[in-house]
Structures are given as C-alpha cells and as structure tokens.
Image (cartoon, rainbow, N blue to C red):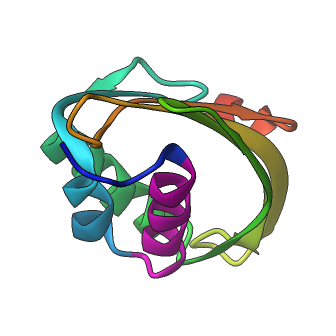
C-alpha cells in the first residue's frame, strides 16, 4: 500500500503528460489499468497506455495541460483541465475536459476516463 492520494496521483499524471513522458505516466498505472479515450476503444494495460501516449505525442508535438481543479475522495479523483498545443501539421489545438481516475489498493491508477468538450478531432 502506498500513501499516494488520488489528488497526488492526478498531479503526477499531469506532470508526466506535460513532460511528454509516457514511461513516467505508465509507471503510475496498475498493470491492468484501462484508459477510456474519446473516439477509441478502451486501451488496456500500462504498457499499451504508454504506447498510446507516444502516438498522441507524435500527433501533437506541442500539447500542454493546465489543471483547473481536482475533486477527490479516498480512491478516486476528477480532474478538470484545459489544454493547448499544435498538431504535427502545425494546426492549433485547444480543448477542455475532465479526466476521472481510480486507484487500486496499492495506490496505482487502475482506471482512467477522459471526456472532452470538443470531440471533433475524433472524426478526422
């Protein structure tokens, strides 16, 4: 059991995102973690989620998140955020959303689910 709270896990996940570090992100996950991302089938497993992030960072070489607030209890957190960046072809990108996470009994993230305000990018 770790002493990491869901709020601390949320902060660590978004630090890894802003550092563009899929390995650091994946290290926070339980091996059987599942990630629900708009426009895709659920991504299962820490290693596969790390690979998914590598693809995301390739598609969006500039992407920064600003965490607006975190609401948490003893096992879960809801993170409200905005992001801004550019796609590989230079097109500007901006969005806002919510990420829900749940920790397992060892303090690792076992569930992630993203909801975006603008999902038009999923139909391109």
Q: Is residue 80 visible?
A: no
Q: Is 5 above or below relative to 13?
A: above
Q: Nearer the viewer, residue 116 or 99?
A: 99
Quadrant where the image shows the N terminus: top left
Q: Position of residue 21 (x, y in %)?
A: 34, 74
The span picked out in magenta is 7-20
Q: Nearer the viewer, residue 57 or 110?
A: 110
Q: Position of residue 69 (x, y in %)?
A: 81, 54
Q: Quick one: which residue is furthest to the top in this view?
A: 41
Q: Nearer the viewer, residue 55 or 124?
A: 55
What residue is rendered at 23% in x and 52% in y? 51
Quadrant where the image shows the C terminus: top right
Q: Is residue 52 left or right of residue 65?
A: left
Count of all numbered marks drawn on residues in the image: 0
Q: Is residue 117 left or right of residue 75?
A: right
Query: Residue 35 falls in which quadrant of the image?
Result: top left
Q: Is 31 above or below relative to 86?
A: above
Q: Is residue 118 left or right of residue 5?
A: right
Q: Position of residue 74 (x, y in %)?
A: 52, 32
Q: Is residue 81 visible?
A: yes
What residue is rendered at 58% in x and 24% in y? 39
Q: Position of residue 17 (x, y in %)?
A: 49, 67
Give the dominant element type of the magenta stretch: helix, strand or loop: helix
Q: Is 56 above or below relative to 44?
A: below
What residue is rendered at 22% in x and 66% in y? 23
Q: Is 83 above or below relative to 32?
A: below
- Find out whether residue 119 is within the magenta segment: no
């Amino acid at each position: 059991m770790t002493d990491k709270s869901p709020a601390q896990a949320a902060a660590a996940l978004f630090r890894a995102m802003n550092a563009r570090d899929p390995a650091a992100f994946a290290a926070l996950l339980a091996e059987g973690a599942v990630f629900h991302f708009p426009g895709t089938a659920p991504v299962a497993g820490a290693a596969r989620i790390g690979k998914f992030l590598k693809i995301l960072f390739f598609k969006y070489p500039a992407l920064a998140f600003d965490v607006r607030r975190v609401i948490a209890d003893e096992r879960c957190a809801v993170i409200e955020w905005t992001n801004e960046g550019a796609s590989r072809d230079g097109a500007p990108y901006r969005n806002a959303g919510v990420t829900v996470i749940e920790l397992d009994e060892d303090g690792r993230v076992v569930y992630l689910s993203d909801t975006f305000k603008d999902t038009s990018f999923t139909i391109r």
